[in-house]
Image: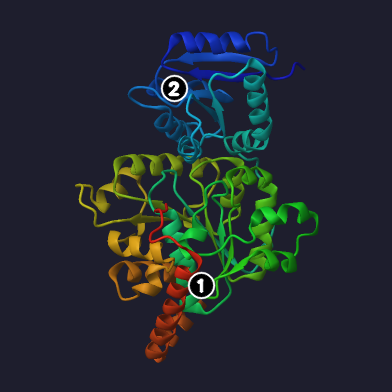
Amino acid sequence: MAQEKIRVMIVDDFADTRESIGKLLYFEKDIEVVASVGDGQTAIQKAREIHPHVILMDINMPGTDGIAATEGIVSVAPECEVIMMSVQGEADYLRRAMLAGAREYLIKPFTGDELAGSIRHLYELSADKRARMAAALTPPAPQPAVTVQPVGSGQLISIFSPKGGVGKTTIATNLAIGLKLLTGKKVALVDGNLAFGDVGVMLNLPNKSTIADLIPNMHALDMDLLDRIMVDHGSGVKVLLAPPRPELAELVAPDHLRAIATLLKQHYDYVVMDTLQSFEDMMLAVLDLSDRIILLTTLEMPAIKNIKLFLEVAEALHYSREKLMLVINRADSSGGILVEEVEQNIRFKVAASIVSSGQLMTTAVNQGVPVVVSQRDSAVSKNLLDLARAVMSEEDLAAATERAAAEPARSNRKARSWLGLGRLRFFALTPFASRRGAD
């Protein structure tokens, strides 16, 4: 049987550029240009209709630019892979492209060999995802009932959103610390945004060791090795940080992250995973293994639209509704959209809401101390701790409630003591007066 050709769509607002790229690929026997369009909106529609394997996307286009078009394509056709093209090589452009869901970045002008090589490389990398998406869309054959043993005793909680800028890292860090404060049990926090993770920044942790240090020894992965790589946070939470440089993220494969998460579930009561807003193989591996997916959104139309699209994909992947937990961040923001309207539009119940608290959050990020500790009595902290209670087991919730009623004074003294240490550590490690914001 003839080998499948790699189906490519070219997106660029200049017709001459589209023609030139087509000519570069004309003599590549294993690559076929199936569409050539001049704007982002048409690209989204075409991706939904023809499902190309790889999309070559210009980053700068009038109207819907390459970043917005890529976000739309990732939502409506998650099996498509995007290579972003630009004359700009700055790090900010690369970061924005990867956050939108692009897998590779080519700087114009490029040669035909560079272009074809990138297309083939990305096609090979995404083979597993294509197979899984195809299987998800095929009705399963009836199977006899079997007893499935749990992977581990712990609970993996992934913080996910198909839209950037909704506060995933803030929720993930505060949720992990909140679970530790309320239960006293073993809690791990993993930065799954491998290329541009901000968990270390949010918690003021030095990146002396990261997940990239595990990869050369994955054949001997065990809890002793993982413990040596994870970083201790002052709260008692153990943190697995993202690599210090984006290129090191390429070392981590989906199977690596799956093995690490499985091992953590066997040894921790709660594992909280910050994620990247994409359907690439890495994130699908995490979402498949998760016991609970906290689906995060804000009361903005683009975010709500993407949540609705994700719910359709989740259904195709056979995720149960009990696995998904819809949470509204910045729920009191003005803008005219009500929570009830969101529920009616997407036909999914909102499980929790978190109020806006811009100044408190900015201060918490700059100090490297989560707001559930620095401002535990604030409305936003109470919302975050309520979210932690919502994902706890019934036994842990009952024990935490009883302990909180019995020892309020002791808990407050402990939190204030750790907060003071956190501030001293921040100024000792960081010579800057402020930090950049985080997702």
User: Is disc 2 surrounded by few (<14), some (14 to 19) or many (20+) residues within 10 Å?
Assistant: many
Q: Nearer the viewer, residue 263 or 88?
A: 88
Can you say whether 187 is above or below 71 in the image? Answer: below
Residue at image position (19%, 47%) is 336
Instruction: Say left or right for 293 vs 152.
Output: left
Q: Quadrant of residue 141?
A: top right
Q: Is residue 71 above or below residue 295?
A: above
Residue underneath mark 1 = 393
Q: Quadrant of residue 62?
A: top left
Q: How many marks?
A: 2
Measured from the top left, where is residue 175 in percent x and y? Answer: 45, 66
Nearer the N terminus, badge 2 or badge 1? 2
Res 356 visible: no
Tell me the amino acid under the disc marked 2.
Ala
The quarter of the picture where the N terminus appears is top right
Q: Position of residue 136 (x, y in %)?
A: 59, 39
Q: Is residue 188 above or below residue 2?
A: below
Residue at point 45%, 75% (across, down): 424
**Label number found at residue 43:** 2
Q: Quadrant of residue 66?
A: top left
What whole-number distance in Å separates the C-alpha atoms at marks 2 and 1?
Answer: 45 Å
The answer to whether 416 appears left or right of 251 in the picture is: left
Residue 202 in sight in this render: yes
2 or 1: mark nearer the eye = 2
